Amino acid sequence: MRMNHPDGKRLLATVRDGDYAHAGEEEAIHLLWERLPKIPHQSCLDAGCGRGGTAAFVQSHGWPTVTGIDIDAESIAEASARHPGIPFHAFDIAQAGVRFPETFDIIYAFNAFYAFPDQSTALQSLAEAARPQAELCLFDYVNRGGFFDDPFARFPESVLWQPINLDVFPAQLEASGWKMTGRLLLHDAYRRWYENLCGRFTARRETLRAEFSADLVEYAIGYYRAMLTAIENGALGGAIVFAERVA
């Protein structure tokens, strides 16, 4: 009954009104791209692209040309079918440097980095896929302190979470071929976004139960309420981290 099952992903996409698996949906995309050049001929990698909604939004706005990768082959098949103008590939993030050596001007990940099992290897692989001075943007969850003691961290699909620790992350980036150039804290925005998401689940509860299993809908409602509580309690937050590939 986990949200990373295909039915769970489809349910979340339905509630988010688009193929998005990240907080803030289109507002969050605009927020990140306020700091990035909008140049159509530049190449961009969406790392952990899921069902492809974010990649499609970026490319449809005439920003860079996007390629998406995700380890989940079923999500990639869905992304390719729904957004045929974008190349999507199913493989582990650790293979990005081998598949795309020094290809991309911009690499971003929306609420994906926290789920990478070996984050240092992922950062190194992304550095290998990036051109010199390429920009890396990670929109992700932040461990504000006490996350692993919070009840939300005990959900089956939360036990492997690795939210960013901003105190040590600059050194982790540097060891992987990147230099941190800035950060934007989004704790209040994450609280607002997840309040809104929980409200949508509640308002559409009966409609969702007609389309999806009732057990899945109730699990999702409980899961995101627990996440919101972790945010409200100060255990979990969000940020965008900006970095540049070291030449």
Image (cartoon, rainbow, N blue to C red):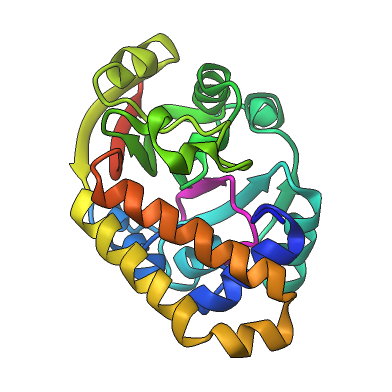
**Residue at the image point whose x is 37% and y is 30% from the top:** 164
Q: Is residue 54 visible?
A: no
Res. 168 image quadrant = top left
Please state if 73 lies on the left or on the right of 196 as rendered. Answer: right
Please state if 40 lies on the left or on the right of 117 as rendered. Answer: left
* Image spot of residue 108 (x, y percent): 45, 44
Q: Magenta stretch: give its range.
A: 40-54
**Residue at the image point whose x is 27% and y is 58% from the top:** 191
* Image spot of residue 24 (x, y percent): 36, 64
- In this orientation, which residue lies closer to the viewer: 100 or 227? 227
Res. 236 image quadrant = top left
Q: Is residue 199 above or below residue 120?
A: below
Query: Quick one: which residue is furthest to the top in this view?
Result: 175
**Residue at the image point whose x is 37% and y is 33% from the top:** 147
* Image spot of residue 127 (x, y percent): 49, 24
Q: Looking at the figure, which quarter contains the C terminus?
A: top left
Q: Is residue 161 visible?
A: yes
**Residue at the image point whose x is 58% and y is 23% from the top:** 125
Residue 55 in the magenta stretch? The answer is no
